[in-house]
Image: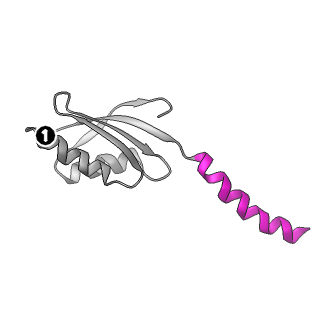
Amino acid sequence: MKRRCLILLPLLTLSANPALSAERTVTLAVENMTCVSCPYIVRKTLAAVPGVSDVRVSYEDGSAVVTFDDANTTVDALTEATARRGYPSQIRMEQEGG
């Protein structure tokens, strides 16, 4: 009986992990978008971050709406990615439930 418990415990732990992750959507305020090609660069940069499933960038608003799996990435990783490309960003708003 003890041996069965030791075998099942890791399986239960593995199957429980996906339930802990959640899809999140955040709006980032993005700086330095000065021309119409900037949103394309910002979108490609954010889409390349593992875990990101959707990116919408607005030149007019200076923002990026990003949907991602929080088990695979963080808001910090998103803002670091844009900053590395010359577009510092910070969280403007987070939507409930993705």
**Residue 42 coordinates in the image, percent (x, y):** 22, 45
Please name the colour scheme applied to the rendered image.
Answer: one colour
Determine the image quadrant of residue 88: top left
Q: Secondary structure at mark 1?
A: loop
Q: Main secondary structure of the magenta part?
A: helix
The front one of 85 and 46 is 46
Which residues are drawn in magenta?
A: 1-20
Q: Vertically, is 93 above or below 18? A: above
Which of the image's four quarters has the N terminus?
bottom right
Horizontal and vertical percent position of residue 66: 35, 39
Give yes or no for residue 80 being in the magenta stretch: no
Which image quadrant is residue 38 in? top left
- Amino acid at circle 1: Asn
Q: Position of residue 76 (x, y in %)?
A: 36, 47
What residue would you read off at disc 1? 32
Left or right? Give the position of 89 relative to 23. left
> What residue appears at the point 80 percent right and 68 percent down from the top-left corner?
6
